[in-house]
Amino acid sequence: MSALVFDVSHLLAGSLVLMSFVLLYQDRLPSLINTFALQSLLLSLAIGWQAQAQGAPHLLVTAALAIVLKAILIPMVLRRLVRSLGIHRTIETVVGIGPAMLAGMALVALAMALMLRVTAAANIFAREDLAFALSVVLLGLLVMVTRRNAVSQVIGFMSLENGLVLAATGAKGMPMVVETSVAFSILIALIVIGIFLFRIRERFDTVDVAALDEFRGDRQ
Amino acid sequence: MTFPLDPALATILIPATSAALLVFVPFYRLGAWFNVLASLGTFVAAATLLVWRPSAGRFLAVDDLNVVFIVLNTLVGFTTSLFSSGYIAHEIETGRLNATYLRFYHAMYQFLMAAMNLALLTSVTGLMWVAVEFATLTTVLMVGIYRTREALEAAWKYFILGSVGIALALFGTILIYMAAQPIVGEGIAAMTWSVLQANAVRFDPAILNIAFAFLMLGYGTKAGLVPLHALLPDAHAEGPTPISAVLSGLLLNVAIYAILRFKLLLAANAGAIAPGPLMMTMGLLSILFAAFMLYRRRDVKRFFAYSSIEHMGIIAFAFGLGGPLANFAGLLHMAMHSLTKSGIFYSIGHMTRIKASQRIADIRGLTSSHPLLGWIFVASVAAIAGLPPFGIFTSEFLVVSSAFAHRPLLAVVLVFGLLISL
């Protein structure tokens, strides 16, 4: 493989991790959604690059799915949702930015140390991708636990899923990648429909029913 | 002996096509009967696998392990569909569900069966993950079907925790592929159980270790092992009772099956950590935790959800212990638990209908007002608590005795947990 091919894939995967960090310190929902859209766009570029580098055109389906669904459609729906719920101006901070960033760095360091050591024998392409992917997964989990709002939790989950797709496409010649990403997209679409229909604002870490908005809106 | 259709394929295709057809059945009685018939057909197809086993295909393979799971799965699926046809008639009368929701309910029921059967029969790790994912989705929709606040909350909780769980499981699945790829080459072979099992000796143990950690966390969430159990009690308490029976009796088994398969891979590799102790620890934790939680329950379905966590703990412990006797005890316990627990949920369905309440305090005097139901329930509770002469006593006894033979200290903890939960 040429140095350029490797460098570009490294750059794209690295910028996914960067976007995860940006997600960590967004305290307004619209900017959080925009950052997620940008991350998904970068993901589809990364997948497209892998498809070309590995000579695996079926990966382009996954790339197209990422761009249409996660970079355009879902952010659009979420933006509308956030505006209609009237929470587009609220600032949510559960953990301060400083501690969250430090925790994020620690997680990335953990992912690097773990993956690079473990996969010493593997193809260098897959190795780097896997380390970056695990970082994105862990940062996504961190976003989920540091947020209270259901929308931002879902965004955390979707960015976690971006990391998984990156890992799956990085593993050379892995079958079922497309099937997996389709299955995941259905899951995500349903989650988004779920919050849209039931107007869930808060996560349910308590049994407090006040956490749920009035579920029967004007219509039913 | 030849069959026009491969029975392994049939156990997946029958529920899958029925699910598609049931969407278009407008009358709920017809739908319920169709549901029963499809479940019966699936069970017959699965039972055929006992006597006639098709050769392994590209995506499906039947072996000695999953044939037990699939027959159990389809049997309980069939009995639950019988119970459900009586249950939903009542739901229509009280207006908790309307005809549209029921159409949806029946279709989802068959879809869930198809997903679980696929997860059990497939020979490809990736396909198993996809199947478990669809099973999760269906469960979420079913749990939330009453549209009450509590049901929605339970569904949402299941959704978020279950999704994170399966996401981690996917990462583990990818890692297993990465471990296999240098040895067996690219493509579908590196995801097929039989190939993986045959070559596991030469896999890089370090990757296998990490992969198992992710898989254990991921599928462990689905199996409800402590400390990953938070999603189970709500989901059991708020969904329709037939679904509680399916969740408790079947879906947990599917997750245990997934863990067991990956455990076998690690056990074949000498360099990898022994997966047994991890499973035994989580199993023991589940038993102890659930045993103490059982005392403070007021909701009868929630009570039995904790009981399911306890029994999953026993099963995980038995499989973690390993060895022919403990493995047999684990399988036996799983079968007994599925049958007994689904029976309990059927009785609960009738009881909550009679008493119009799920609170344990409200349910009393049944042995005098409805003697048959009352005594059946008493017997099945005795069975699930592990009293002789019922099956669970036998399997628990086997687990305990093999634990004493191999790990006497752990056996003391195990017996303590079992006694507390009595």
Image (cartoon, rainbow, N blue to C red):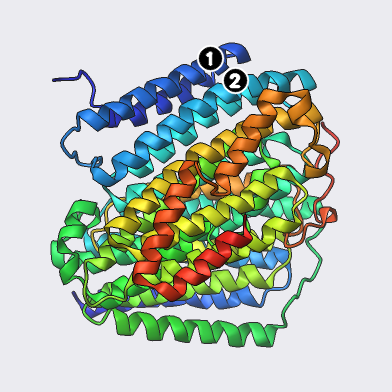
Q: Residue at x 62, y 67 (%)?
A: A144
Give the amino acid at mark 1.
Trp
Q: Earlier in the sequence, mark 2 or mark 1?
A: 1
Left or right: A83 as drawn, with respect to B210: right
* Residue B303 image offset from top left, x and y in percent: 68, 49
- Pointer 1 indicates a residue of which chain? B
User: What is the x, y in percent for residue A129?
Assistant: 35, 73
Q: Nearer the viewer, residue A203 or A171?
A: A203
Q: Quadrant of residue B46?
A: top left
Residue where numbered disc 1 is placed = B33
Tell me the SS state at disc 2. helix
The amino acid sitting under disc 2 is: Ser
Q: Is residue B233 left or right of residue A43?
A: right
The C terminus of chain B lies in quadrant: bottom right
**Dots 2 and 1: beta carbons under 8 Å?**
yes
Question: Left or right of B376: which side holds A3?
Answer: left
Side (left or right) of B52 relative to B142: left
Label 2: how many Cα within 10 Å (few below 14, some 14–19, many 20+): many
Q: Is residue B112 above or below residue A147?
A: above
Helix, strand or loop status at disc 1: helix
In the displayed structure, A57 sits above or below A166; it is above
The image quarter in which residue B210 lies: bottom left
**Residue that badge 2 annotates:** B85
Name the foreground residue: B267 vs B25.
Answer: B267
Name the residue rendered at 79%, 37% in the picture: B363
The reply to whether residue B180 is in sight is: yes
